[in-house]
Amino acid sequence: MDIPDDIFTEPDAIDPDTLAHLGPLRRLAGVWEGRGGVDLNPKADGPERKEYSERMVMQPIDAQPNGPQLFYGLRYHTHINTPDDEITFHDQTGYWLWEPATGLIMQTVAIPRAQVALASGRAGVDDTRLVVSAERGRTDYGICSTDFLEAAFRTDSYRLEVEFHPDGTWSYRSETVLVVKGQGPFQHVDRNRLAKVAEADLNPWLKLVRGKSAG
């Protein structure tokens, strides 16, 4: 990456309309549900396969400048349950980010088992397939875990593939390579297909701008 001499000056005339500048991430904006999820995870007596239902909310955030670098993005929250669990099976929050100037896409991942990751990839505005990945040990696009997870269920890599379908749905396949204490490497896989149940809201800055215009 080329770093400019001026690392402080932000872009002029940033457009407040995030939904208009999300590039390939625009198709993710909204509220989504899917009931056909499948999870393959490690257990003491061997791999376990579970089916799950998922609700994912993706709402636009205001433009985010890092000096001259500019991101548009979505804040997301996904909540997952399985038919036989009354408690939450999986909860995850984070951001999807798009840098229009370079085609860089990123997903931040935070889960309440005290683990975070920053995954990256590249995409064009009209791409119908997105791929992001992160690796343990990297200081740019890496994975950070607690000492227990490092020792018992070490995460070496994370890869997420997203595919947009002509009917407006989208699907994903998540592959996480774990090193399980006493068992060795394990490929943890999740996949689901989601349909939109509600449109996205406007980002806060655009709401403010439109409110002033209306007044």
Image: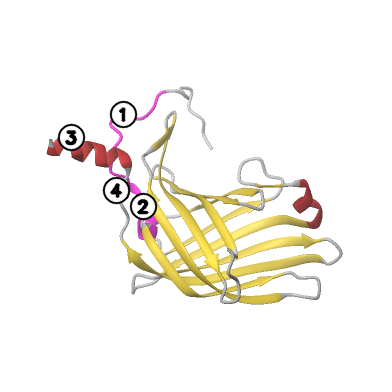
Magenta segment includes 197: no
Residue in view at x 73 percent, y 61 percent: 178
Q: Position of residue 128 (x, y in %)?
A: 41, 65
Q: Residue at x 63, y 57 (%)?
A: 158
Q: Amino acid at mark 2?
A: Gly
Report the side of 20 relative to 139 (left or right). left
Q: Which residue is mark 4?
A: 202
Viewer-nearest residue: 131 or 179: 179
Q: Mark 3 touching mark 1, by CB under 8 A? A: no
Element type where label 2 sits in the image: helix
Q: Residues within 10 Å of mark 2 (few under 14, many from 20)?
A: many
Q: CA distance from mark 3 to mark 1?
A: 21 Å
- Residue hosting label 3: 212
Amino acid identity at mark 3: Lys
Picture mark count: 4
Which mark is nearer the camera, 2 or 3? 3
Q: Earlier in the sequence, mark 4 or mark 1?
A: 1
The quadrant the C terminus occupies is top left
Residue 182 x/y as whole percent: 87, 64
